[in-house]
Structures are given as structure tokens and as C-alpha cells.
Image (cartoon, rainbow, N blue to C red):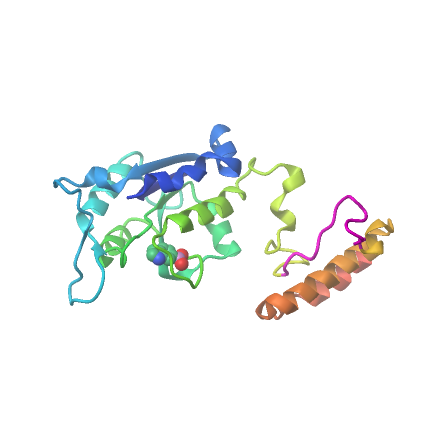
Amino acid sequence: MRLDVLTIFPEYLEPLNVSLVGKARARGVLDVRVSDLRDWTYDRHNTVDDTPYGGGPGMVMKTEPWGDALDAVLADGYEAGAHGPALVVPTPSGRPFTQELAVELSARPWLVFTPARYEGIDRRVMDEYATRMPVYEVSIGDYVLAGGEAAVLVITEAVARLLPGVLGNAESHRDDSFAPGAMANLLEGPVYTKPPVWRGRGIPPVLTSGHHGKIARWRRDEAFRRTAENRPDLIERCDPSAFDKKDRET
Ligand SMILES: OB(O)c1ccc2cc[nH]c2c1
């Protein structure tokens, strides 16, 4: 997969050189290219924004730098269709970013990220490129950020870990909180490791019982409990019948 990021803060994307994404790049699974949007400005101040039509606070990111930058990036092998690029626009007004969307994005060969700053990007940019490729306007949550670069880091990590060869079997995303299966849509329950006692605190005896069926049921119950506490909205999306089947198998 190729990932392009166009940003006025290239240094913000340094974390894409380390950890899971960094390793995937080193292994050639990911081809990440970060470009400075200001390279496509031609005035003395490298201007990327201007006042909003209709008035109001803040500034809007101008069309020209984005258009010139996107055309330059896309000139490098652009093709339309499922084998072509998709535009990913992190924005507070976008659709929620979910594991399901991460899976959808991980199936594409090329993602081009355009993180916004200020009050956002002139609408005509997304409208223009929507004539050539899918445009995903995505929000990572209901909170205010200074820009979309943090969202690019989040989306990139969630997508990269789904790519073949990125996670080893031991780290498989198969058992993720939001991966398909009996525990789908449940939060992770509590986890424990050595030492068996720490500051007088032991661990749940079932975890050292050696009874895999009881351990699985305990983990399911704890996942339900934690989900009911922190994300009751997810409970209704669970399929309890899957647990009965899973219990019978263990
Ligand atoms: O919540 B978000 O995903 C998000 C994304 C981009 C920007 C830009 C300014 N605030 C933002 C918030």
C-alpha cells in the first residue's frame, strides 16, 4: 500500500517512521510519502489560507495549493477504480472512523491523506477530486483538534496493522475488540501477567485453573461487564448466541 500525506506540518508525521508503521515501511509493506503543502505555494509568505467567503471567524485553506499538490502526487501512477487512490480527508465534520472503515481502507492500494487545519479546506477541492476517486471524509472523534495530522496517525496505524505481513501471528488482529467473531463489538476485559501477587493483589483464580472453557467464559463475562460499564451502546450490537456456540466448542 502507498500512503501519501500532504500537510503544512510534515514533522508532525515523524511517528510514521517508528513502531508498527515504521517496521511495515522498512519491510516494504507500506510506502509512505509525506509532502509539505507549502511546496505548492508561490508567494513570499507561502500562503495556504484566506478569509472565508460569507465572513465568520478563522481562515479557510485555499484551493490552489491543494489542487497543485494533489495533481503532482496523483501524476505518479494515478488510475481510476478499485486499484487507484482514494482521498482521505480527516475532518471534524466527517463520518466516524471505525474498525469497519479501517478494514475498507486497508483494501485499497493507495490512500492520499489531506489533513485540514484552520476552519477546513475549501469545499471545491473535495468536490473536484470526488469526480476521479472515492473521497472519505473521516472524524476520529467528537473533540476539537488543531488539525488533522493527529487523525492521520490514528487512521494510518489502524489501517496498517490490518495489512498482510504487518502483524505476526502472535499479534494477530483476529482477536481485536472490534474484529468480527463472538467477541465482536466488545471491549477487552482485564488482563494479568506475572508476578502472581503484587502489593498484596492476586489474580482471578480461574486464569490459573487450566480449564480453558471456564477461562473463555470468564473472559467473555468480563468483556460484557466492561462494555456495559463503558460502552452500553455496543451491547445491543453483540450477538449473544455466538457465545453459546463458542462455549459449546470449549
Ligand atoms: O476529530 B477529527 O477527526 C478532526 C480532524 C481534523 C481536524 C482539523 C481540525 N480539527 C479536526 C478534528
Residue drawn at (85%, 55%) of the image = 205
Which region is colored magenta? 186-203
Q: Quadrant of residue 121?
A: bottom left
Image-based side of 157 in relation to 51, left or right? right
Seen from the viewer's position, the closer of residues 49 and 134 is 49
Q: Quadrant of ligand 1?
A: bottom left
Residue 32, horizontal then vertical, whole percent: 40, 36
Identify the image quadrant of the N terminus: top left
> What is the quadrant of residue 94 in the picture?
bottom left
Q: Is residue 29 left or right of residue 237?
A: left
Residue 106 lies in the magenta-colored region = no
Write the residue at 34% across / 54% down.
146
Q: Position of residue 204 (x, y in %)?
A: 81, 56
192 or 152, which lies in front?
192
Residue 16 sits above or below residue 117 on the image: above
Instruction: Judge whether residue 195 is colored magenta.
Output: yes
